[in-house]
């Protein structure tokens, strides 16, 4: 079954760092822009960052300068390095592509304490 598998979340203090990983099917990863999204409690899911197959990244203003998205073609994996985390970064983080696929992974919880 085709799926997206996110990992790497956890509980961290404000100012700390986490690295998220997402393994994707090769058929999707090799040709699509990959992206990270997040959904905080009571809020809509929002786009965080994306990266095209050749590696040009884009970021939401709220994470620019703190988060770095990257992709490893050999592992069909996309990463999100998150530094200088803030309590407002607390959310479930999901990876997907652009355009969005018709399914989502389970996500990974990121909780930033103040």
Image: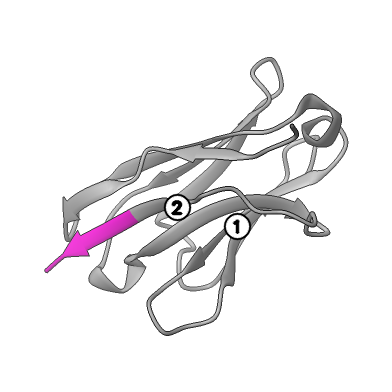
Counting residues from the N terminus, which is met first, the one under dot 1 or under dot 2? 1
Q: Is residue 111 magenta?
A: yes
Q: Nearer the viewer, residue 67 or 21?
A: 21
Answer few, some or many: residues within 10 Å of disc 1's Cα (few below 14, many 20 plus, some between 14 and 19).
many
Instruction: Please tell me whether mark 2 sits on a helix, a strand or a loop.
Output: strand
Q: Is residue 88 left or right of residue 104?
A: left
Q: Are marks 1 and 2 in contact (CB under 8 Å)?
A: yes
> Please, which residue is most extreme toward the front here?
1
Residue at 64% x, 18% y: name it. Answer: 75
Q: Which residues are magenta?
A: 110-114
Residue at label 1?
A: 49
Q: Percent position (x, y) of residue 84?
A: 27, 56
Residue at 68% x, 33% y: name it. Answer: 24
Q: Nearer the viewer, residue 24 or 31?
A: 24
Q: How far apart are the two marked residues, 1 and 2, measured between alpha carbons?
A: 8 Å
Answer few, some or many: residues within 10 Å of disc 2's Cα (few below 14, many 20 plus, some between 14 and 19).
many
Residue at 88% x, 36% y: name it. Answer: 31
Asked if residue 111 shows in the view, the reply is: yes
Magenta stretch secondary structure, dominant = strand
Q: Percent position (x, y) of residue 64?
A: 49, 63
User: In the rendered view, would you say 17 is above or below 29?
Assistant: below
Q: Is residue 29 left or right of residue 85?
A: right
Q: Is residue 24 magenta?
A: no
Q: Percent position (x, y) of residue 92?
A: 42, 60
Residue 27: image quadrant is top right
Quarter of the figure with the N terminus: top right
> Please, which residue is most extreme toward the bottom here?
42
Residue at label 2?
A: 67
């Amino acid at each position: 079954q085709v799926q997206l598998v996110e990992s790497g979340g956890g509980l961290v203090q404000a100012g700390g760092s986490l690295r998220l990983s997402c393994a994707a099917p090769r058929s999707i990863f090799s040709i699509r822009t990959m992206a990270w999204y997040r959904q905080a409690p009571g809020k809509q899911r929002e786009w965080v960052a994306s990266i095209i197959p050749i590696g040009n990244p884009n970021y939401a203003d709220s994470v620019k300068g703190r988060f770095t998205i990257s992709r490893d073609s050999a592992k069909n994996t996309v990463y999100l390095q998150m530094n200088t985390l803030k309590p407002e970064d607390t959310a479930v983080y999901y990876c997907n592509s652009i355009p969005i696929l018709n399914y989502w992974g389970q996500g990974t919880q990121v909780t930033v304490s103040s």
